[in-house]
Image: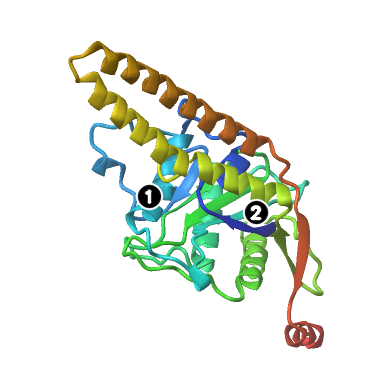
Amino acid sequence: MIPRINERTFVAQSPLGAALGHSVSTQEELTDRTVVAYWPGLDFSAREGEQAVWTSAQWAEHLNDPLLEHPFTAGAQGDRRAIAHIDVRLHPDDRALTGPEWAEVGHRFARVAGIEVPGDERGCRWIAVQAQPQRLDLIANLIRLDGTWHAQPFNLAQRLVKEARRIETDLVLTPVLGTGERQAVRAVPTASTQLAAVLSQLADEQSGPLATVRGLVEHTAHRLARQPDGTSQATAHRLELVARRIHHIQQDLHTTAAHLPEATHPRVASTPPAVRNAARRAP
């Protein structure tokens, strides 16, 4: 089992699309067979009147919400890239895990990454997505519901690797690494992945700049449509067409971002020498 830390992004659409293997959609519903685990504060009953099963676009919006509710919260040096993404891949020879087993894996990695604290319902929003064979994706917003920023552990890679070894033992899976030096893979973004994040932010329906422009155009069109003269009616109609074109541009940007290559150059983070030496001295 190999955990990988991906580059953080501004919005959840890009990592969720990577987890699904395609761009998010307002039509595709994700059942509990796909979203196998999520943060403990999520309660579907609180969303009375809405469907019990959400689309992938709704899940992305759910993860993005803290960014909108707390617009001034940021990490070190004002970093607003709050969406964290960790993916975990099994050994090719491993058996297929059951739904409950994938859920256990999701919760265990969420806890060891510090984004889930038992009993804390004001913490980070996160979901675990199992949509591709032998793979689980953990996507989280590092802005807590109380408006504070969750700083990831400095030794996150080592913590994830140690948990992977324990899970391999507990679930009787194939150890990916030998008994010597332990290694963790951190994804280093290529220009394509960085551009995909930028395009997704531009096209975001909730907080992207194009959404703001489109909203202003639609608002102006609605005000003009209420005017009695024919000139205003014609102008309102033209503005509605402009708003529709902006929406098409947003959709095109989302599609373009989803089709950019996602290849990354792996960076290998080794266990500190003291740990390696201790392992060598162990009987």
The quarter of the displayed image where residue 172 is located: bottom right
Q: Amino acid at mark 2?
A: Val
Residue at which label 1 appears? 65
Mark 1 Cα shell of 10 Å, populated few (<14), some (14-19), many (≥20): some
In x, y percent, where is residue 205?
43, 38
Q: How far separated are the C-alphas under marks 1 and 2?
A: 25 Å
Which residue is drawn at the image coordinates 77% and 46% (left, top)? 92
Q: Is residue 177 above or below residue 217?
A: below
State the quadrant of the N terminus.
bottom right
The quarter of the displayed image where residue 159 is located: bottom right
Which residue is drawn at the image coordinates 55% and 73% (left, top)? 153
Q: Residue furthest left?
A: 228
Q: Nearer the viewer, residue 238 or 157?
A: 238
Residue 186 is at least partly visible in this image: yes
Residue at which label 2 appears? 88
Which residue is drawn at the image coordinates 51% and 37% (left, top)? 33
In x, y percent, where is residue 87?
63, 53
User: Is residue 111 shown left or right of residue 165?
Assistant: left
Which residue is drawn at the image coordinates 40% and 65% (left, top)? 73
Please tell me whether mark 2 sits on a helix, a strand or a loop: strand
